[in-house]
Amino acid sequence: MPGIVLITGGSRGIGAATAHLAASRGYAVCVNYKSNETAARAVVQNIVTGGGRAIAVQGDVAIESDVMRLFETCDAQLGTLTALVNNAGILETQSRVDAMDAARLQRVFAANVTGVFICAREAVRRMSTKQGGQGGSIVNLSSRASVLGSPNEYVDYAASKGAVDTLTVGLAQEVAQEGIRVNAIRAGIIDTDIHASGGEPGRVDRLKATVPMRRGGTADEVARAILWLMSDEASFTTGSFVDVSGGR
């Protein structure tokens, strides 16, 4: 049964697509955003206009106090969480490892690793039957980069997603008897504006020939896989990965 889902980085791209699809399937949605309030409120307005329930909550997942406030606001305004989508993440301008400085690495790992851990911690504290919860589902957004390494572009991003993969496997085993399933999506080359953040808005067009299906994926295609992992249709699936990558 649908319940309440918190989606980090839910104002655009895969997060926004997941918010809309979750709402269409009956979930109440907490749309987290870091800075783009206008986009987040547009997502919420579209959901509410369609008869759904949604709120927008600002918070930087790299800051622990923001994460605490985010989850507490969701508790107060929507109710007990039943699903978390750890979608928020960043990448920096394309670079080789020998040109990366520590400040860059700290930014990437704070958002992509520490943020995911802290959000998962807060979700477990609410969902675990051992702690009085009713169970739930956590879906982490990883990347095929965790397997492929992303050489000459984003090895730091790829490494951060490797950490997400390890978290997914380990946490899934920790909470398997507490009513919580933990899985991850390894997204491939998806047509969202994250590529512009790396300095190459046209990256999908450049790389689509390396994808067996010869195209980039869409945010909606990733969202459908996320919703499946959240659903009762995936009731015996935990510690697992779904590659949404066109075969790459």
Image (tube, rainbow, N blue to C red):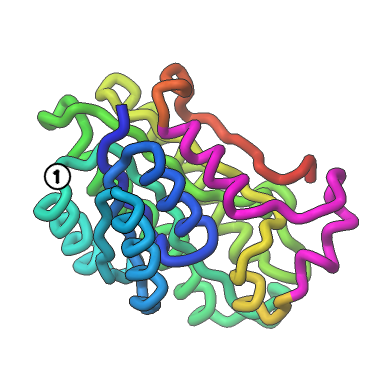
Q: Secondary structure at mark 1?
A: loop
Q: Position of residue 233 (x, y in %)?
A: 46, 21
At which x and y percent is residue 125? 19, 41
Residue at which label 1 appears: 79
Question: Observer-nearest residue: 135 or 101?
Answer: 135
In the rendered view of the protein, which quadrant contains the N terminus? top left
Q: Is residue 71 magenta?
A: no
Q: In the image, is residue 171 above or below residue 90?
A: above
The residue segment tinted magenta is 202-230
The residue lying toward the viewer, choosing from 145 and 27, is 27
Asked if one can make out residue 168 in the rendered structure from this viewpoint, the answer is: yes
Identified at 63% across, 49% down, the residue is: 187
The reply to whether residue 169 is in sight is no
Q: Is 38 placed left or right of 74 in the picture?
A: right
The structure residue drawn at horizontal position 33% and vertical position 38%, both measured from the top left corner, is 26
Query: Is 220 one of the magenta-colored residues?
Result: yes
The quadrant where residue 224 appears: top right
Three-letter amino acid code of the residue under disc 1: Gly
Which quadrant holds the C terminus?
top right
Q: Nearer the viewer, residue 21 or 136?
A: 21
- Location of residue 205 with respect to 23 vertically, above or below: below
Q: Residue at x 57, y 71 (%)?
A: 91
Q: Is residue 218 left or right of residue 236?
A: right
Query: Observer-nearest residue: 115 or 227?
Result: 227
In the rendered view, tell whether residue 152 sits above or below residue 129: below
* Quarter of the figure with residue 186: top right
**x and y percent of residue 106 in the render?**
46, 73
- The percent position of residue 175, horizontal first and vertical second, equals 31, 28
Instruction: Please say if 171 is above or below 152.
Output: above
